Amino acid sequence: MRSICAVLFTTLLPFIAAAQEEVPSVTAEPAWNPYLVGMMIGVLSWFTFYFSQKPIGASAAYAKVVGIVGNRIAPKHINSIRYYRDDKPKVDWEVTFVICVIAGAFVAAWSGGELTGRLLPPFWVEHFGDSTWLRLSIAFAGGILLALGARMAGGCTSGHGISGTMQLSLASWISLISFFIGGVVTAFLLYYV
């Protein structure tokens, strides 16, 4: 497996470098070529299905991390929950996937010249003021709502939007369309209201 990943990484490295050079970081255009990134996500999906026989997904990782932390604090309670009896909480490939997504986002922002180090983007300050606590509170509340919604929907944008649509799942296509509608409504509320 390592040799396959090494070959894939070495093969894609020139494309990544070329994608970064295509668009200067001073423009509003993406620093990474979106077609290349889409292709890389597709290849990642193939590898995930091949090596783990599971689709890409991130929302289950959050439930597993809660189970790991809960096991340290209240092991009797965690063991009483059927979800954790059936699937023991542990650091597995899904948790590793989420950690790698966060690390990959950092690398992409850094290598694309988009790492600003700002906690409050100018758009936020212009519309909502310069309160750091307001920004962090809304981000935290949004994250909780997003995680709850993903668990209720049986998947997140990666589980439904990438893996599910790739398998032509009707539920995943409905979820993906709903994600876009929610994004459009939110953007409208932020930009025009």
Image (tube, helix red, strand yellow):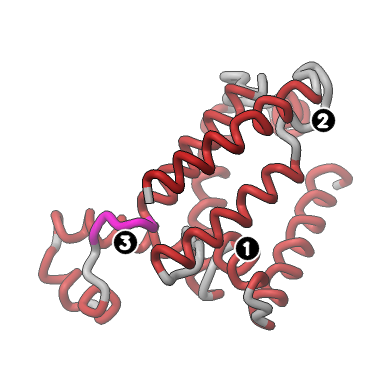
Q: On the picture, is 32 further left or further right than 40? A: right
Instruction: Based on the picture, tell me whether residue 66 belongs to the magenta stretch.
Output: no
Give the percent coordinates (x, y) of residue 74: 14, 62
Look at discs 3 and 2 and give the one toward the viewer.
Answer: 2
Kindly state the secondary structure of the residue where label 1 is placed.
helix
Whichever of labels 3 and 2 marks the residue nearer the N terminus, that label is 2
Q: Is residue 165 above or below residue 104?
A: below
Residue at image location 21% in from the left, 77% down from the top? 85
Whichever of labels 3 and 1 marks the residue nearer the N terminus, that label is 3
The residue wearing badge 2 is: 29
Residue kind at label 1, given as amino acid type: Ile
The residue wearing badge 1 is: 162
Disc 3 to disc 1, C-alpha distance = 21 Å
Query: Do the numbered discs 3 and 2 sit on residues whose CB atoms are within 8 Å?
Result: no
Disc 1 to disc 2, C-alpha distance = 23 Å
Residue kind at label 2, given as amino acid type: Glu
Residue at image location 58% in from the left, 22% down from the top? 110
Relative to the observer, which residue lies in front, 184 or 52? 52
Among the 4 quarters of the image, the one containing residue 100 = top left
Kindly state the secondary structure of the residue where label 2 is placed.
loop
The residue wearing badge 3 is: 64
Disc 3 to disc 2, C-alpha distance = 36 Å
Q: On the picture, is 80 further left or further right than 125? A: left
User: Majority secondary structure of the magenta segment?
Assistant: loop
Magenta part of the protein: which range? 90-94
Instruction: Based on the picture, tell me whether residue 93 belongs to the magenta stretch.
Output: yes
Give the percent coordinates (x, y) of residue 134: 57, 35
- Dot 2 surroundings within 10 Å: few (below 14), some, or many (20 or more)? few
Q: Is residue 82 above or below residue 74?
A: below
- Could you say which disc has been placed on residue 40 in the image? none
